[in-house]
Image (cartoon, coloured by chain):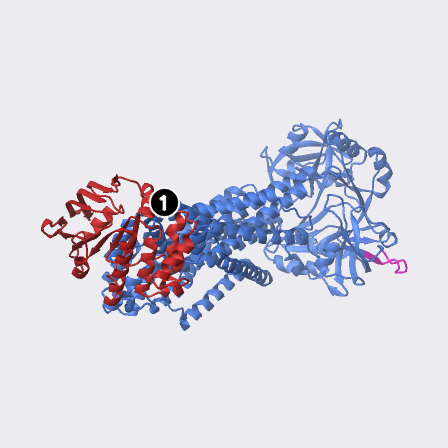
Amino acid sequence: MIEAIELNKTYTIDDRRIQVLQDVSLNIQPGTFAVIQGSSGSGKSTLLSLLSGLDRPDSGTVRIQDQDITDLSEDDLAPLRNRTFGFVFQSFYLVPSLSALENVMFPAELSRSPHAAADAEKLLERVGLSHRRRNMPHQLSGGEQQRVAICRALINQPAIIFADEPTGNLDSQSGQAILALMLEFQREFHTTLLMVTHNPDIARRADTRFQLTDGRLDPSRDL
Amino acid sequence: MPGGMLSKMIIRELRQNRQQTTVLFLCIVLSVVGLTALGGFQANVHQAMLRDARELHAADVIVRSSFPFLPAMESKLAGLTSRADVAMARVWEFYTVVRTPDASASLLSAVKVVEPGYPYYGRVVLASGEPFHEMLAPGDIVVEQTLLDRLGLAIGSRLFLGDAEMTIRDVVISEPDRPVTVFTLGPRIFVSARDRQRLGLITQGSRVRYMALLRLPASLSPEAVQEELWSAADPTQERVDTFRSADSRLKRFFDNLLFFLKLVGIFTLLLAGIGIQSVLTALMRARVKTMATMKALGAPNRFVMRLYLGVVLLLGIFGTACGIAAGLGLQQGLTFLLADLIPADATFEVAWGAVGQSLVVGLLAVVLFAARPLLNLKHFKPSALFRHEKQKNRWLPGEWLTVLLTTLFFVALVLWQLEDLRIGAYFIGGLLVLVGVAFLGTWLFLKALQRLAVRHLALRQAIRGLFRPRNATLAILVTLTASLTIIYAIFLIEKNLDATFVQAYPQDAPNVFFLDIQRDQTDAFAQLVDRPLEFYPIVRAKLMAINGQAIDPGRERQRKSDNLARPFNLTYRHHLLDDEKFVEGNTLFNPNGGTFQVSVLDRVADIGNIRMGDRLQFKIQGVPLEATVSSIRTRTRESMQPFFYFVFPDAALQKAPQAIFTALRVDPSEMAALQNRIVQALPNVTVLDVSQSIRQIAGALDRFSQAMRFFTLFSMAAGILLVVSSIIATRAARIREAVYYKILGAPGRFVLYVFSLENLLLGGASAAGGLLLAHLISWVVCVRYFDIAYQPYPAASLAGLMVGILAVVLVGLSASRSIMRRKPIQFLRAHAAE
């Protein structure tokens, strides 16, 4: 369960305060596919970063599996990010100095899994990239990089996957394939998938949708 | 584009890239600081010496010899002094042990016997303020305060010099032609020439420096007189100088010191230059989008070029000015560090010539080392806004020209600073070999590292980090290795010299030498000492030629090591010493080879490339002697035992003018009593307490190496700046790595661990490589150059290794601190903004 209570967030740029989120509260049930929708600048990526513990709200609370993570330090968040969360970003964010296989293995190795390599190999095979496992990120296409990023997010079988516009940098065919893959994995591993997108076609396939407008959740658009 | 806009942009570029510009600025400062300090210091010392060159030598023309002047010279001097307007004063300098009349105390002293007239220029300053020659009446002496202190005497006390009992009349404060006192073996005593015979100390074979000082009228050119005297001189033993041409020992000492410091200064300049190039390249790459935007908006190439040229020139001028200011501070520090070695009037002064030279060298270095990155600006295309294009490494003709000009600049700088083509070539060659070996070793190390299958996650990440694009790992490792090699080598050589000559003074090695024993005094001497002795006869001679090829004194004197132009002490015997063995030949002399054979020590054989069967021509007080090399010896261990380069059969030298010496191990508590006994009975015998001299030499050596180490630290600083510049150059990549690690669940300590390991690899590889090369260089220098046994000092080496590694790790980590602190969201937000 992901729970947000009265989240507020402001940024200060050159003495100018910008309220990005205002009194945002939400609940996401485990094993569901939830989408945060909104136009550019609506605060959806900020909300994702607060829910995933990448950033802290000015006020309000974030609970993950009944644990309050709002004020956890970076080091306290590290095991959560490693085992409970998985991340998929629009710009993939693969470690450039690691091969595809090593990128996928990395979170498992951090958690000292003895099967890191075998699990990574299996995942890459599932997404059809086993022949590219020795390739470095810059030798892969955008779609391939995102598939590697999905494998990396899944290797520790996390309870929640946070995805920030995962198809935003891909052509529509690759985007469709990536979405299908993510949903396939979500169902198979009973993972909670929280995705930020402005694509209505993707949003339509979600179990839960949240519409953000000017930093506020629009209750009328919640499912 | 209006100039106002350009200058505004230059200022903003400087402000926005504070880290890069700070490192760039520091590199520029470093490039000139050493050479400014050394140039200024050298100018100060030389200026002080030249300013009073006449006083430094106390005469217009000086004739010197280690022997009484030969008849031809005497007659020439007599001819000259027959002129009413030419004055001449003779001076005799030697060491002797003086004693109190009750024989309770004795001391080795530097005696200077002077004729009236000395010094023609400058003044001997006495404590009483009285005129020098008024106090130096027959039977009176003037001494240094140290002598009074050490012998517990006062003005008016009596003192025995040789056979004569003299009265101390005054204390000498300073003398014009003896500005440095640190290397003398004993305090000064002035004696009037009228007492010379009474002393009984200047006899055949005594180690006396004979001098004739001439004062000329203004109408007579010193150079003309010098030439006239040269025509009568025997160049093998007599030397004629004017006050302008005379090369003082002090000047030679400083020339040697500055020579080594300049080597380090040039090396620092080179490293700083590489730093300038590396930081500037990083700066350009960090600004690729800015440049692409400017070009996309229609800014021509030359605008972008002018913008960054402005940045470079502004930093260059400011950095060079600050470097010069810091150099002047350092020059003052050097003056302070070597205060008691430099002439008293060589105080700190701004040498504007040296400052001007540093300004030109600094700006030239900045422009040349910055030229390549600036020319590279042409490669940046507006399309970089849309896609991350890999920079093509295509060299423009201008870039090749820059490399050529930079090389020429460096070579010219080396030759100009070192003032010697041969040594300059050796330096460049040595540096190329050092950098080449460091490069090869590093390249192999990195290749091996790349292929290594590492299971440990953090170590694997650290190794991968070394190969991240723009990391300049190879350049960092090569420069750090080369600078650490020099630092470690200086340390190891100094330790070995110290151990051989100072610390590990062997228990059985002689600690006192008795010089100038006359042949008829050996029995009396043996009786006084009452222990087994080996007497070593010595015959002073000069080597004239090898196989008919004359020794070139000018070239020989340029050698930094021993040279063949100096007078040698020959000896004769028919047995090997305990610490000798043959390298070539089985006996000292060939039984059928006749009288004129010579056995040569390998050290001098190496200097002169002397081989078995070669014919060596000597001159002993004007008498020629030719001998064939019959064997080559080496010493089995380095010790304080006496050794001789040239050993002859008895028959060859027995009749030559000679002195005898011996060496003994004396318990320090018995030293004073024995010295007094000997001096009382045989006043002409000089007692040389070696352990005391060694302490003095060690003190000077320590100061010398302190100065060297200090300057080498600048090289190290330049190497460290390279590490910092590389971290700045790869800052974005490092932040990305750190953020990814954190997003994927790595705790902060993992990021710290990976970065620490990466710096540890850099520091470890460069320190280990540097130490290995330093051992190799130090071994060669100790064994081949100083001819001493080499000790590797494992514990000290390990400590040096640790210090080197720690320095790199700490600098690397502190430069990465802000990177490690970066929170993932800051990166994600910034990236989203792109």
When the figure is inspected, residue B596 is found, relative to residue A82, above or below; the finding is: below
Left or right: residue B657 compared with residue A97: right
When the figure is inspected, residue B257 is found, relative to residue B507, above or below; the finding is: below
Q: Position of residue B136 (x, y in %)?
A: 67, 37
Q: Position of residue B526 (x, y in %)?
A: 84, 36
Q: Residue furthest front?
A: A188
Is residue B392 part of the magenta span, yes or no?
A: no
Left or right: residue A47 compared with residue B256: left
Task: Provide the letter of the chain coloured red.
Answer: A
Looking at this view, is B39 or B780 the one in front? B780
Magenta stretch: dominant SS?
loop
> Which color has been applied to chain B in this rendered view?
blue
Looking at this view, is B822 or B778 the one in front? B822
Is residue B595 part of the magenta span, yes or no?
A: yes
Quadrant where the N terminus of chain A is found in the figure: top left
Q: What segment carries the magenta color?
A: B589-598
Q: Chain of mark 1?
A: B
Q: Quadrant of residue A80?
A: top left
Q: Position of residue B405 (x, y in %)?
A: 46, 67
Residue depicted at 85% across the width and 50% down the height = B573
Residue depicted at 61% across the width and 58% down the height = B221
Q: Mark 1 sits on what residue?
A: B747
